[in-house]
Amino acid sequence: MQTIVVTGAAGFIGSYLVAELQQDMYRIIAVDDFSAIRKEKNLLNKSIFQKIDRKDFIEWLEVNHREVDVMLHIGARTDTTEQNIAVLDELNYSYSKALWELCTTHRIPMIYASSAATYGNGEFGYKDDHQTIPQLKPMNPYGQSKQDFDCWVLKQTQTPPFWAGLKFFNVYGPNEYHKGRMASVVFHTFNQIQEKGEMRLFRSHKAEIKDGYQSRDFVYVKDVAKVIMFLMDTQAESAIYNLGSGTANPFIDLARFTFEAMEKEVNISFIDTPEDIRDTYQYFTCASMDKLLQAGYRGGFYSLKEGVHDYVKNYLLTKQYA
């Protein structure tokens, strides 16, 4: 039986991964800050071989590396409004470097979470080309911390036997109840409709883009897990890969699909984008998925309508966890 480490195991994507991995009978070592009460339900009834606090894990790995077959480094400080660069440097850059170096030394395959926030306003496009990545200009410190690590990785001549960095686009799905303001737009839309019978979207502050037609590449967490498990199993070409759906959808469609799934009449209005995020707000993202497809991935992706309906009907309406 293979032993898989999942960092960030109590978080949104990490806990969904744990749910999928346990079905395939992997031995799971879960790493996180388990003192966060709001995340406890994400791991309830999960089959976990061992839990290790994030602060103790590097020391543990130095001693117990022979027990680990694959490292899935999903843990990070994911608050895109975080301005404390020291925190981001510690959790998103320095910690990731330490894990990379241990995986390199002890020949452990490593898959880690990057972010589409590295693309900034999209002036260089959304293609996961290693030649272009160093030119990217993130618009917030979170994105910069992910960019810094990606650029450091690409300079390394000593690497794990297989590695992949995954630029997550706008991920949504079960187990994000704890994320507060940083939860997906689907989650916030559902809750606003439940409470008020309406959805207020951010108004566009660009003349060329209509209100509600700011567009993002939304990717369902079930597809994220499938891609990670594909790369883990096949160990295709080591590279940084986009992980989106390959389709940009406007927020107004996301809201309509949520109303549909809840079987409620559509009621959408618009409010100004908050000033603290207005200057760094992305109006369009769309992942180029060619590299992943060329690596052999054939698992497909949920359409936004399919994903929203599954999420709302099978999780949000019944308050279920994966």
Image (cartoon, grey):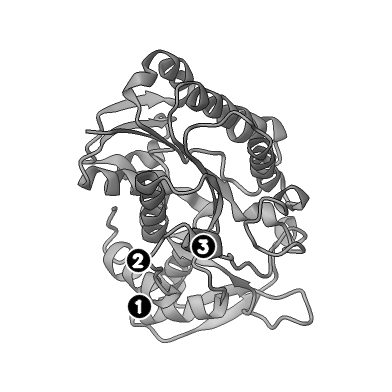
**Disc number lying in front (3 or 1):** 3
Judged left or right of residue 49, residue 87 is right
Question: Of label 2 and label 3, which has the lower sequence position?
Answer: 3
Does residue 257 lie above or below 233 as drawn? Answer: below
Classify mark 2: residues with Cα within 10 Å, few (<14), some (14-19) or many (20+): many
Classify mark 3: residues with Cα within 10 Å, few (<14), some (14-19) or many (20+): many
User: Residue 149: where, in percent of width, then height?
Assistant: 65, 38
Q: Residue type at mark 3?
A: Gly
Question: Of label 3 and label 1, which has the lower sequence position?
Answer: 3
**Residue under circle 3?**
244
Residue nearest the observer in this picture, 14 or 135 = 135
Judged left or right of residue 86, residue 177 is left
Q: Residue type at mark 2?
A: Tyr
User: Residue 186: where, in percent of width, then height?
Assistant: 46, 67
The numbered mark at residue 261 is 1
At x 34% / y 49%, what residue is drawn?
16
User: Residue 199: where, in percent of width, then height?
Assistant: 52, 75
At x 33% / y 82%, what residue is drawn?
263
